[in-house]
Amino acid sequence: MPERIDADVCVIGAGYAGLTAARRLAAHGKSVVVLEARGRIGGRIWTQVLSDGSAIDRGGAWLAPQHDAIFGLAKEVGVSTYKTWVKGAHLLIGEGRTRRYTGLIPKLSPMAVLTIALAQAKIDRMAKKVPLEAPWTAPRAREWDSRSVATYLERAGIRSSIGRDLFEMAVRGVMTGDLNEVSFLHLLFLVRAHGSISTLFSIEGGAQENMVEGGAGSIAQRVADALGDAVRLNAPVRSIRQGGDHVVVEADGLTVSARHVIVAVPPALTLEIAFDPVLPDDRMTLYRNSVAGSETKTMLVYDEPFWRADGLSGQTAEPGSAAEVTLDATPASGSPGVLASFTFGRVAERLAALDPAERRQAVLDALATRLGPRSASPREVIETAWWTEEWTRGCSMAHLPPGILTRYGPLIREPFERVHWAGTETSTTSHGAIDGAVRSGERAAAEILDLA
Ligand SMILES: Cc1cc2nc3c(=O)[nH]c(=O)nc-3n(C[C@H](O)[C@H](O)[C@H](O)COP(=O)(O)OP(=O)(O)OC[C@H]3O[C@@H](n4cnc5c(N)ncnc54)[C@H](O)[C@@H]3O)c2cc1C
């Protein structure tokens, strides 16, 4: 017989959204149970502790200075952050040469630099017209939602092929999908949710400014520790049955009867839970079209961050290569030296066709041309292909193809009887980021507290 638990609220998913919701509800005296499919908490945040005790982030890692909600949570549980290393030159590889630069935009021709700045300013201006709570009501919502990001970028007027490639890769990195399949309105909404497009791309003042001491998972771990036995691991939820004044949630080996449920899983995974009554067609269509993209994050661990002594920041870019973007992800102590290397969308998929040893070599070869021979001998290489993870299936967030946001967007946060929705995909401010997940958990908890 499966174990039976009664609770005020059953939260499904122990990522940042679900854990935050549970924490807020528990603080208001509600009994909660959090059902998590994996054998660990954190979801798209996955901190791994190495044999020397240092922590690396296989998933989400960086926080922008604007991310008040996650900074607030970190403070509540006593976890500190530190600044990402930015000293030294960044490298851009393309057109057969390596360019060293500092700041956000590389030293391309003046015309290329100007046209990139103009394209960014134009996107920011359009994004300002997108209401954060209801992007589908923007005056030009239908027009923007009918075109893909790729068609927009083709006409963005950026001069120089490396400039276009760099911009395309940066946008592909934030949407993590084939840009032919991403709605331009979704990109504008994302930009609005983060303030500006350069915020998304930047280290200083932007999305990559801060890292978490002990890894991004350490905040979630403290939240989960405080919830104690309320968090149940290895408990994938299979069905949600609503009727009368309660909801019955069936997970492997466990049945929970609750007054309310918060589903805090990536949209595509909601489709794998059997609902009774069934989810309405329009909501199913929204989730079927919430496509999480392909992204591989490879962590390379060295005895020390040797590139710093060579006057390099560790931030490098080579669109289309086996290491499209690298960033210095060294712990605050300065040891070991850690580089995070990414591939996005079709580039990640193309490399996935190689066998693991060939792929690893391709990454190391790419790094050797940028950072020299020492980069060829990391102590450890830890690769995570997020779109193949059973309980994530894509990252870093779900993107919407043209036509979906205007048509089905209003459903995103609308409760389905006693079921409420959290998860970074349901957030407005900081949409797609850890901070958005935390905010979505706060919002979903508040919805339920407001009912009482
Ligand atoms: C490689 C990568 C890099 C990223 N980089 C950053 C970054 O630097 N900064 C940033 O802010 N954000 C980043 N992100 C995004 C960030 O990680 C997410 O926005 C955030 O972690 C999402 O949290 P969530 O709680 O909404 O969802 P998730 O973390 O996905 O949590 C959902 C949970 O639900 C569980 N689950 C799924 N189905 C079921 C089921 N049926 N039953 C029970 N449990 C289930 C999952 O196992 C998971 O634990 C990155 C993501 C990835 C993958």
Image: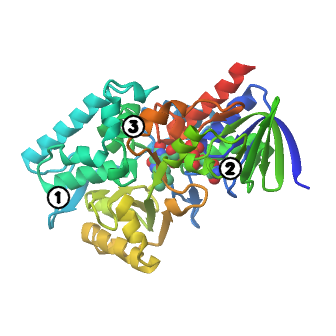
The answer to whether mark 1 and mark 3 are in CB contact below 8 A is no
Q: Which residue is disc 2 drawn over?
A: 273
Image coords of residue 228 (percent x, y): 77, 44
Of mark 2 and mark 3, the one earlier in the sequence is 3
**In this rendering, the label closer to the viewer, 1 or 2:** 2
Q: Residue furthest front?
A: 281
User: Mark 3 falls on what kind of element?
Assistant: helix
Image coords of residue 281 (percent x, y): 59, 41
Of mark 1 and mark 3, the one earlier in the sequence is 1
Residue 202 visible in rendering: no
Q: Does 445 appear above or below 78?
A: above
Of mark 1 and mark 2, the one earlier in the sequence is 1
Q: Which residue is disc 3 drawn over?
A: 190
Q: Does 387 appear above or below 256?
A: below
Q: How is the image coloured?
A: rainbow
Q: Which residue is disc 1 drawn over?
A: 99
The answer to whether mark 1 and mark 2 are in CB contact below 8 A is no
Is disc 1's CB within 8 Å of ligand 1? no
Image coords of residue 187 (percent x, y): 35, 40
